[in-house]
Image (cartoon, rainbow, N blue to C red):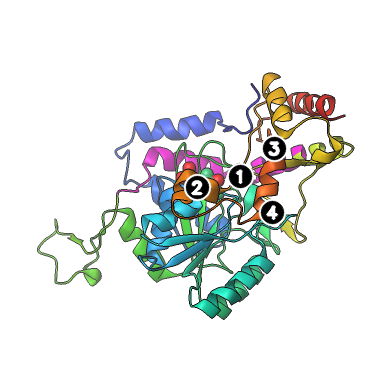
Amino acid sequence: MIPYGRQDISESDIEAVVSVLRSDFLTQGPAVPAFERSVAEYCSAKHALAVNSATSALHIACLALGVGPGDIVWTTPITFVASANCARYCGAEVDFVDINPRTYNMDVDCLASKLAEAARVGKLPKVVIPVHLCGQPCDMAAIHALGQQYGFGIIEDASHAIGGRYLGEPVGNCRYSDITVFSFHPVKIVTTAEGGMAVTNDADLAAKMALYRSHGITRDEAQMTHAADGPWYYQQIELGFNYRMTDLQAALGVSQMHRLDEFVAARHALARRYDRLLADLPVTLPYQLPDTYSGLHLYVIRLQLNALKHTHREVFDALRARGIGVNLHYIPVHTQPYYRKLGFRGDEFPQAQQYYAEAISLPMYSGLDFSNQDRVIDALAEMLR
Ligand SMILES: *Cc1c(COP(=O)(O)O)cnc(C)c1O
């Protein structure tokens, strides 16, 4: 089976992990801060906090921004469930903003009109979480301007987008957001097996996230209620979690970061080939917002169903039967049984619904060679012509 995504591990990645195994620290050693510096420098962000998943990073980002019971958080319905669940962990309500039919990201016009209505009825969101779907940056300048106007915080879910650029600057520099979150799951662009990171330019948010990452415990006397009892002393000043990344993972991350630009370039070479070789088929190819560079975690096509004699499901099944691990990113989050129990009907966001009826993620990862990519293209062409 050609998967839709997979990790790209080199001998130096393996050596980096093995050298941690031979060292004094398997966790809470020097590799974690080294990985944090590497990502912060790459993104031009001031602070970076490595955690054990992007899900954890989203959770502590929401907590640091003060999300709690009585608050509302908005995100897009076309995302992984974690982008919405983080608000539920904090006891907040979740609502969604429909997607743009070309970028598949949160639609800024829908956001603006939903905000105007929310302001009228006094139900404005505390935080909005735009997701850079497939690696395509959202229109962050516009979302940021709305944030200023309506007073909400912004967490960028950039799980798909490390290595991408928006208006000439790296995704993660937080110019238009409070916090940006990355995922290092093996299908993502760089991996630490499991892992995530939250980056920010705000020292106060960084300090809060550091507390939530590790039990709410501080060893900084300035944060304590009284002077330390002795050199052993720490205080728990918040209710936090154990969301720490290990040094094994961080060493893999440092090593992978050396190849980030190479990984993204390889993804772009594959995307250009898909663009060219699928151009004559009855499918809608990915659109790229001007002045952005995608991290290209995913390459999603949409079937032009009225031009086809097969259904979406039939195309899917036929490709899978031929050993092509196509996938669907994502099932609209508000249609999940958990969210339906919270009151969503499933038909609230028509663009998301239509996207779900047509989308297919094709294999896209740096180790995919052109001959295997040709198998994908040939199978699609056979099915769709
Ligand atoms: C993968 C992903 C997450 C969760 O990442 P983990 O590191 O697996 O917790 C969150 N949001 C989006 C958009 C993702 O793709």
Q: Which residue is mark 3?
A: 360
Q: Which residue is mark 1?
A: 260
Span of residues in magenta: 242-270
Mark 2 to mark 4: distance in Å?
Answer: 18 Å
Q: Residues within 10 Å of mark 1 (few under 14, many from 20)?
A: some
Compare marks 2 and 4 and give the one earlier in the sequence.
2
Could you say where residue 283 lies in the image, as x and y percent from the top left?
A: 81, 40
The secondary structure type at the circle numbered 2 is: loop
Mark 1 to mark 4: distance in Å?
Answer: 33 Å
Q: Nearer the viewer, mark 2 or mark 4?
A: 4
Q: Is mark 4 within 8 Å of ligand 1?
A: no
Mark 1 to mark 2: distance in Å?
Answer: 26 Å
Compare marks 1 and 4 and give the one earlier in the sequence.
1
Q: Which residue is mark 4?
A: 351
Could you tell me which residue is drawn at 66 percent across and 49 percent down? Answer: 353
Mark 3 to mark 2: distance in Å?
Answer: 18 Å
Q: Nearer the viewer, mark 3 or mark 1?
A: 3
Q: Is mark 3 within 8 Å of ligand 1?
A: no
Q: Amino acid at mark 3?
A: Ile
